[in-house]
Amino acid sequence: MLIPEKLRVLDTSAVALMKAIKNPVEIQGLINAHIRDAAALCCYFSWLEREVHKGNITEISGANKLEEFRKEQEDFVGLSFSTISSVGPNGAIIHYEPTPATDRTITTEELYLCDSGAQYKDGTTDVTRTLHFGTPTDYEKECFTRVFKGQMNLGTAVFPNKIKGNCLDTLARKSLWDVGLDYMHGTGHGIGAYLNVHEGPMGISWRAYPDDPGLQLGMFLSNEPGYYEDGKFGIRLENIVQIVNASTPYNYKNIGFLTFETITLVPIQTKMLVPHMLTEKEITCLNDYHSLCREKVGPLLKKMGHIGAYEWLYKETEPIG
């Protein structure tokens, strides 16, 4: 029997909203999980940098090694999704998953895109980094820099309480749009607290999310712009961000203003950046971010005895500019 129109209530599920707005325990758990996850990724990328020249590491064996490093972390339960370990043209396939038929060797000649995540008892992670273990082309560096600028532009945005996520999407794309480039996926999705790695009802995309309640304090989302050249390479940078209160001199109609705080703590490969394309603000923000990576992740790596990864972390977080 159909419900009469006048008796219908169309609104965001109360349960979905309670999941999306994290409580203090969930917030701290997500922050802690991302520190441990960053340690695992530092171990993996430092190991990969040392071993890649041997020519015997593939997308699949690399992903398996990353899982081994994650298993070392306290409260690790499993992967939050199958690792997107992708080399060269495979990186241009947005939801690629390596198989024995497609498995490519990770080399010093091509970009390597690694999108991965884990489930810990206190939180869920999802992070993407794109690296080159040799000498990238000028075009690859320009594209990477534009993706980075978009991620930084969105990650430092200040916005009114309950604004719809699609209103912020262009912030991540502008640097690409400036030169006629774009990417064909959303910019951000919600993430669960030891739940689904993709969680609604909010998101950041060129499309409006039909049940989007607006961005609110305590929500966590991904910030993941990218750029892809079919048959050549893929670039994506993904951080998880927490919505926090912004400090503003004014507060129009007392609606409240918010901003993002990045909880992913994995270095950005600075050799992929074109320095003259960066503003002073972007350089300062990157250096501050890398300082935080050292402060939060370094002690854990030392405690676990991963001195090689600790040294790699410090090398990769040297200030630029």
Image (cartoon, grey):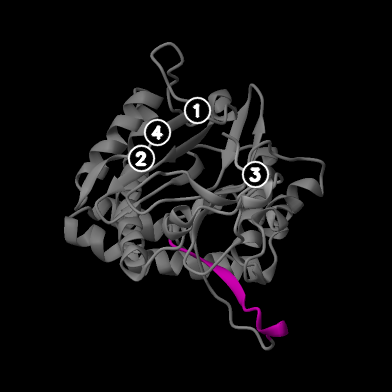
The CA distance from mark 3 to mark 4 is 47 Å
Amino acid type, label 1: Val
- Assign the C terminus to one quadrant of the image: bottom right
Vertically, is 25 above or below 237? below
Give the image location of residue 279, x and y in percent: 70, 66
Q: Residues within 10 Å of mark 3 (few under 14, many from 20)?
A: few
In this view of the protein, which residue sits in the foreground, 187 or 321? 187
Horizontally, is 152 left or right of 175 in the view?
Answer: left
Q: Any mark on residue 80, and which?
A: 2
Task: Specify start and end residues of the magenta stretch as a single range.
Answer: 251-263
Residue highlighted by disc 1: 87
In this view of the protein, which residue sits in the foreground, 162 or 283? 162
Residue highlighted by disc 3: 4
In this view of the protein, which residue sits in the foreground, 141 or 41? 41
CB atoms at circles 1 and 4 under 8 Å apart? no
Of labels 3 and 2, the one closer to you: 3
Give the image location of residue 42, x and y in percent: 34, 50
Q: Magenta stretch: residue 255 in it?
A: yes
Judging from the image, what secondary structure is the residue with disc 4 in? loop
Q: Residues within 10 Å of mark 1 (few under 14, many from 20)?
A: many
Of labels 1 and 2, the one closer to you: 2
Give the image location of residue 41, x and y in percent: 35, 47
Horizontally, is 157 left or right of 88 in the view?
Answer: right
